[in-house]
Image (cartoon, rainbow, N blue to C red):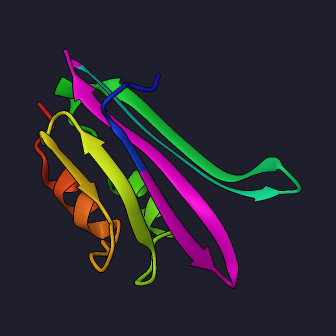
């Protein structure tokens, strides 16, 4: 389930092809849901090339390394974080003008947030 207030959108280029990455990383009220979708547009249609989702009880403190390793296959030094809104971190990150953020700016903080 996607949660309002916890959406992240990034743009990346892999092997010369442009992709959008949309993630929703949410913890709250004892439940957690981490999801990402990678896609591109072709002739007005959305082509999803990769997705991953984990739902779990927050108290279980699962190993998230596999989820993030899968996501980081799509992140490189040229990737751009367009926007990341996160209720838990009480912050919004975004690129604008000469300030271009890599998605790792957000994800590195999210990986370090304790799962309660």
Residue 63 shows in this picture? no
Instruction: Decide if residue 66 is on the left or right side of residue 93.
Output: right
Q: Position of residue 24 (x, y in %)?
A: 40, 39
Q: Main secondary structure of the magenta part?
A: strand
Residue stretch in magenta:
9-30
| Residue located at (30% from left, 68% from top) | 104
The one nearer the camera, 80 or 56, is: 80
Residue 12, image x, y percentages: 54, 71
65 over 22 or under it: above or below: below
Q: Is residue 39 part of the magenta span, yes or no?
A: no
Q: Nearer the viewer, residue 44 or 97?
A: 97
Q: For residue 22: magenta?
A: yes
Which residue corresponds to the image point at 13% horizontal and 47% vertical from the top-left?
A: 113
Provide residue 52's location: percent of width, then percent of height: 54, 45
- Give the farthest residue toward the front: 97
What residue is rendered at 45% in x and 26% in y? 2
Residue 52 vertical placement versus 33 (above, below): below
As drawn, 33 above or below 109: above
In which quadrant will I find the C terminus?
Answer: top left
> Which is nearer the eye, 63 or 100?
100
Residue at left offset 15%, top offset 35%: 88
Q: Quadrant of residue 81?
A: bottom left
Left-right relation of 66 to 104: right
């Amino acid at each position: 389930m996607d949660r309002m207030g916890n959406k992240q959108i990034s743009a990346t280029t892999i092997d010369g092809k442009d992709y959008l990455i949309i993630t929703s990383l949410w913890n709250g009220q004892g439940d957690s849901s981490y999801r990402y979708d990678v896609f591109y547009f072709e002739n007005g249609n959305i082509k999803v090339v990769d997705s991953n989702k984990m739902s779990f009880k927050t108290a279980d403190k699962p190993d998230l390394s596999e989820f993030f390793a899968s996501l980081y296959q799509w992140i490189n030094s040229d990737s751009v974080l367009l926007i990341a809104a996160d209720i838990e971190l009480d912050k919004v990150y975004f690129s604008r003008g000469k300030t271009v953020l890599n998605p790792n700016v957000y994800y590195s903080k999210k990986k370090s947030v304790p799962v309660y």
